[in-house]
Amino acid sequence: MARSTARPHSETRRHAPIRTFLHTVDGVTIDSVYDPPSFVYDSSRPPSRDLVFVVAHGFTGDVDRPHVRRVVKALTRYGAVVTFSFRGHGASGGRSTVGDREVLDLAAAVEWARGLGHTRVATVGFSMGGSVVLRHAALYGPESAARTDVVVSVSAPARWYYRGTAPMRRLHWLVTRPAGRLVGRYGFRTRIHHRDWDPVPLSPVEAVPKIAPAPLLIVHGDRDGYFPLDHPRMLAAAAGDHGELWIEPMGHAEHAVGDELLDRIGDWAVTAGG
């Protein structure tokens, strides 16, 4: 008789998600979705009722992209999940500032998640979103309704203006040139702001020491075509004892992260700081 390879939590039942538009403090509307935790049968660890993951997608993503929804489906086995489209992406308003004012978008999503009754928030960001969750955690302290309790940053840069790889040189063309912004708008459904940063925001590596005592997990692929391994190592060094670094056999961000790794991230967030 063939041996079953089904996962212990493979049988699930889910409630319908809730979709709404949030408003940031600077007046941008943010398309947002709340997915309750899955009802899991025969699981060794049922999902946490107090924990909510707030997922920050990468540049040119949005809440409806298949790779973002796959992340949501995996994490609902461990808690509720809030996803949102950053400004300038998908159905959200405004224009992308490529990681600067996006901290306000994340703050609005975290406040909404807490308003739904969840007492623990784990922010999980990918690529641009990975840099945003680091800066957000540094900027919103323990007294803020937009604070986070656990931080997971996947495939994030350590410093701004990096152009050391071909994909990053293409991205800089997309962001800085009028023709590139047209490609972003019509090819990737991403509306990019034409103004330069002023002032330049706190860099991810500068933000990391300000995150403590919140637990921090830094995840990076050993085949990441955008940011080589000196980026996660710089972040981990800046984090010191309160950070944890996983170098994984993968490429870049949501497209590359596998279900097994998402399970480990979910499990880590449930137990971190608990």
Image (cartoon, rainbow, N blue to C red):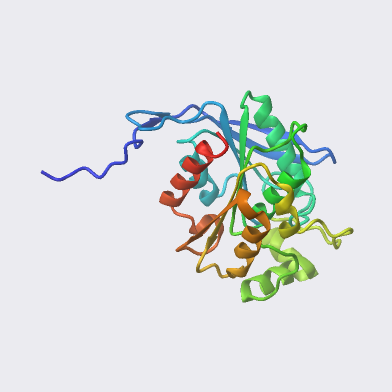
Residue farthest to the right, as pictured: 198
Residue farthest to the left, as pictured: 1
As drawn, 120 above or below 26: above
Point out residue 150 in the picture as x, y percentages from the top left corner.
Answer: 61, 41
Q: Is residue 189 visible?
A: no
Q: Is residue 78 left or right of residue 168?
A: left
Looking at the picture, tell me which residue is in the foreground, 224 or 151.
151
Identify the image quadrant of the N terminus.
top left
Rendered image quadrant of residue 108: top right
As drawn, 91 above or below 274: below
Point out residue 198 in the picture as x, y percentages from the top left corner.
Answer: 89, 59
Residue farthest to the top, as pictured: 117
Looking at the picture, tell me which residue is in the foreground, 134 or 82.
134
Rendered image quadrant of residue 128: bottom right
Q: Is residue 57 left or right of residue 100?
A: left
Looking at the picture, tell me which residue is in the foreground, 252 or 248.
248
Question: So how many labels did they put on this image?
Answer: 0
Looking at the picture, tell me which residue is in the foreground, 210 or 184.
210
For the point 77% across and 40% down, the residue is 140
For the point 78% across and 55% down, the residue is 97
Point out residue 127 in the picture as x, y percentages from the top left corner.
Answer: 63, 57
Point out residue 177 in the picture as x, y percentages from the top left corner.
Answer: 79, 70
Identify the image quadrant of the C terminus.
top right
Q: Is residue 56 left or right of residue 1?
A: right
Q: Is residue 265 visible?
A: yes
